[in-house]
Amino acid sequence: MIDIDFSAQPLPEGPAPELALSHLDTLWLQVTGTLCNLACRHCFISCGPKNESHPFMALDEVRRAVETGAAMGVKEYYFTGGEPFMHPEIREMIALTLEHGPLSVLTNGVLIDEELAAWLADTFERARYNFDVRVSLDGTTARENDAIRGRHTFEKILAGAVRLHRAGLNPVFTVTTCHAELAESAGRQRFFELLAERGITRPRLKFLAPFKIGREERRGGAYAPYERLTEDALDEEARRSLQCSSCRMVTAKGVYPCPILIEEEGARMGDRLEDALAPIRLDHPACYTCFVEGVTCRT
């Protein structure tokens, strides 16, 4: 093992870059706020059963955000939380959003029983626009996954995903590379093999680097002082590639630049989507991860 002295890394000089909203293509909605049935150790906004920092969105709040976004030219919508399927009106929210554009729902899969899987698959078949369900899984064994997502979650997550697949909706699996080997080709191949064993013969996988904030800061360590962006780090192509140049996040507490920063002081942009069209300053270390890793939360 090679030891790296991070204290010897040069500190970035100059102001953080400013990024304009080029066009509002993607709208995120934190439908269940920070309430979740799991308390994953790598959660960058520390969601859990007792975290009510951001409460559930009301159905009318979701309708207003979606309709406003549609009028502004939004091309795709995302539901996240917390755990979206904890919301008692999630089906109504899905139905009204699919009247306006493609929708992805991000879930841990634990609450997907046979009846819900059948409803989601039927919605997929009937929808005017594309409808995706993204299931989070963080290992190819119970030992790997449960160390991150909690005891006995591995089989529950897979069971929910398999129910979706059997009902006719092929889910996307999101894998956070907290286990370093999962970022390598051999580790990724293990996922294909696992899903094939469970009967998912055309697996769809999305790998994401962890963000060192929230619980992940305690689990894997905080950002180093040098992990910051400066104005000279971004050319025009890099600016266009950053997801916050074309997305915003709506919660019950207001509007934010992206899904990553809803618990960060100073990130709130206003009460309404119309308040969030101004440029943002990329002065948070999480912006560094998006840039260096080429991260996009989009499906």
Image: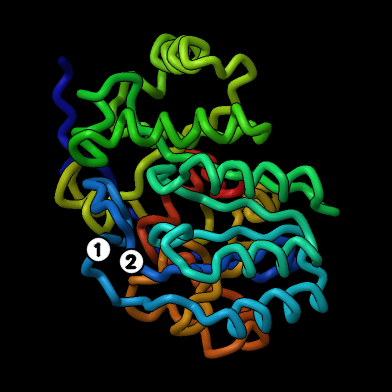
- In the picture of the structure, the residue carrying the numbered disc 1 is 49
Q: Which of the pair 10/175 is nearer the observer?
A: 175
- Vertical order, 149 against 94 (above or below): above
Is 247 positioned to the left or the right of 223 in the image?
right
**Mark number for residue 109?**
none
**Residue 1 at x, y percent in the picture:** 15, 15
Q: How is the image coloured?
A: rainbow
Q: Which of the pair 29/226 is nearer the observer?
A: 29
Is residue 288 at all visible to an observer of this figure?
yes
- Vertical order, 47 against 18 (above or below): above
* The quadrant where residue 92 appears: bottom right
Q: Looking at the image, is mark 2 or mark 1 earlier in the sequence?
A: 2
**Mark number for residue 35?**
2
The residue type indicated by label 1 comes to Pro
Residue at x 47% of width, y 58% of height: 85
Is residue 15 at all visible to an observer of this figure?
no
Residue at x 48% of width, y 69% of height: 88
How many residues crowd around disc 2 within 10 Å: few (fewer than 14), some, or many (20 or more)?
many
- Vertical order, 61 against 2 (above or below): below
Q: Secondary structure at mark 2?
A: loop
Q: Secondary structure at mark 1?
A: loop
Q: Which of the pair 124/11 is nearer the observer?
A: 124
The residue type indicated by label 2 comes to Leu
How many residues crowd around disc 1 within 10 Å: few (fewer than 14), some, or many (20 or more)?
few
Alpha carbon separation for disc pair 2 and 1: 5 Å
Q: State if disc 1 and disc 2 touch (CB < 8 Å).
A: yes
Residue at x 47% of width, y 10% of height: 197
Q: Which of the pair 288/256 is nearer the observer?
A: 256
**Residue 283 at x, y percent in the picture:** 41, 66
